[in-house]
Image (cartoon, helix red, strand yellow):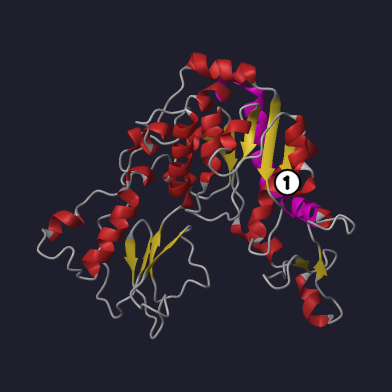
């Protein structure tokens, strides 16, 4: 990987008509046509930082937005935990932690130590703030069991904590989950949202544990080394097909339109109303009906992903080569983790807005600043 991502450090937006702007598309400044809208009731010039490059409905059109993936924050927390635990030296940096390459001998020894096929570790299937995206990982786990062999589910609300205790695993959090993943060949690391740039700590842990992570983040190879992972794809149309059934909110959670109905029926048959499928209600069957529904709806889209995992599980040489891959390439230079990505986005915003921070500097040289490198295609 190594081509310069187009747009970073190179884009000059059209003449501005409004002070506030989005920062999107690898740091490009997006022209906002919104009027009388602002990010904050207190300060109209606030720069908001968001996890994903997707602009949600609550992200006002008049905001200045910087894409700041959560993975950066948690990579630092993981680094600090490893130093405190003695797994890393005091001189460890995020970049040095994520660029280590295993030798073939080390990778082969790790493969020999594996005791289990696959695991998915989650706190729940669905919370009121999730979209249907968060269910993709559960559908994949069920499909692996249906088409190949069981992938262990350690769901806290379904007795996962007891299973972990029986397997001599301790309860973990975002900074140390890698400690209980080393027994598994594969770890499903799909996030709560499947949109470009939505990167969380889940993909780091398998790398540190000597396992292979499975993700569905679109364009993940722009940000991290996709060759170290199994990258799956599920079309937005398939996600939307399931999302339209969900009617839950923070006030009324876990509401779903009946799965034996279709959207065209909802407008003509007024007696069709949402049903509660509560993952925490054992007496009502939890949300088993939801999981069956999404697995059926996404089976065709996820089958290529299942096939990738099965093929890799059967090919020791290919698996070892995955383990030999670092989490990020290019020694971490011009990456998410050396500050290049965020710094370039901020620089563009300052330049476009004529900020005093950049006044008196050589603008042409600043505009020619090289941005983040793509990791893998």
Say which quarter of the image contains residue 283: bottom right
Does 161 appear above or below 321? below
Q: Looking at the image, which residue is at 46% across and 22% down?
A: 102
SS at mark 1 in the image: helix
Quadrant holding the N terminus: top left
Q: Which residue is mark 1?
A: 156
Q: Is residue 353 left or right of residue 213?
A: left
Does 109 appear above or below 194? above
Residue 90 picture location, percent across and down: 37, 31
Q: Looking at the image, which residue is at 32% across and 61% down?
A: 28
Mark 1 neighbour density, 10 Å: few (under 14) some (14–19) many (20 or more)? some
Q: Is residue 144 left or right of residue 321?
A: right
- Find the residue positioned furthest to the bottom: 36
Most common SS among magenta residues: helix
- Find the residue positioned furthest to the right: 283
Q: Looking at the image, which residue is at 79% across and 76% down?
A: 266
- Let me know if residue 308 appears in the view: no
Q: Looking at the image, which residue is at 41% across and 32% down?
A: 97
> Residue 59 or 158: which is nearer the viewer?
158
Magenta stretch bounds: 290-318
Residue 240 picture location, percent across and down: 65, 63
- Find the residue positioned furthest to the front: 84
Q: Is residue 16 magenta?
A: no
Residue 331 picture location, percent across and down: 34, 33
Count every numbered label the image shows and give the total: 1
Q: Is residue 374 left or right of residue 219?
A: left
């Amino acid at each position: 990987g190594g081509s310069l991502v187009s747009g970073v450090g190179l884009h000059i937006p059209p003449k501005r008509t409004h002070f506030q702007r989005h920062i999107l598309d690898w740091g490009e400044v997006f022209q906002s046509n919104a009027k009388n809208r602002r990010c904050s009731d207190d300060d109209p010039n606030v720069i908001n930082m968001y996890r994903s490059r997707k602009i949600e409905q609550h992200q006002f059109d008049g905001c200045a937005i910087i894409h700041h993936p959560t993975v950066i924050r948690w990579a630092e927390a993981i680094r600090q935990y490893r130093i405190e635990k003695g797994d890393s030296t005091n001189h460890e940096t995020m970049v040095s932690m994520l660029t280590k390459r295993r030798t073939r001998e080390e990778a082969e020894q790790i493969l020999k130590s594996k005791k289990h096929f696959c695991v998915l570790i989650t706190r729940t299937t669905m919370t009121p703030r999730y979209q249907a995206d968060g269910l993709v990982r559960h559908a994949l786990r069920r499909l692996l069991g249906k088409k190949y062999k069981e992938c262990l589910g350690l769901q806290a609300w379904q007795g996962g904590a007891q299973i972990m205790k029986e397997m001599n695993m301790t309860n973990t959090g975002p900074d140390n989950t890698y400690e209980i993943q080393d027994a598994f060949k594969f770890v499903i690391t799909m996030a709560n949202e499947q949109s470009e740039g939505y990167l969380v700590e889940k993909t780091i842990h398998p790398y540190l544990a000597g396992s292979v992570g499975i993700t569905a983040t679109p364009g993940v190879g722009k940000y991290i080394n996709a060759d170290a992972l199994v990258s799956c794809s599920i079309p937005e149309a398939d996600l939307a097909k399931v999302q339209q059934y969900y009617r839950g909110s923070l006030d009324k959670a876990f509401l779903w339109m009946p799965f034996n109905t279709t959207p065209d029926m909802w407008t003509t048959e007024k007696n069709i109303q949402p049903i509660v499928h509560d993952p925490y209600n054992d007496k009502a069957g939890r949300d088993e009906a939801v999981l069956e529904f999404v697995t059926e709806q996404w089976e065709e889209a996820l089958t290529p992903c299942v096939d990738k995992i099965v093929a890799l599980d059967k090919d020791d040489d290919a698996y070892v080569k995955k383990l030999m891959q670092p989490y990020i390439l290019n020694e971490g230079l011009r990456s998410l983790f050396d500050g290049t990505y965020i710094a370039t986005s901020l620089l563009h915003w300052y330049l476009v807005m004529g900020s005093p921070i950049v006044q008196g500097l050589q603008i042409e040289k600043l505009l020619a600043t090289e941005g983040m490198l793509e990791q893998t295609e």
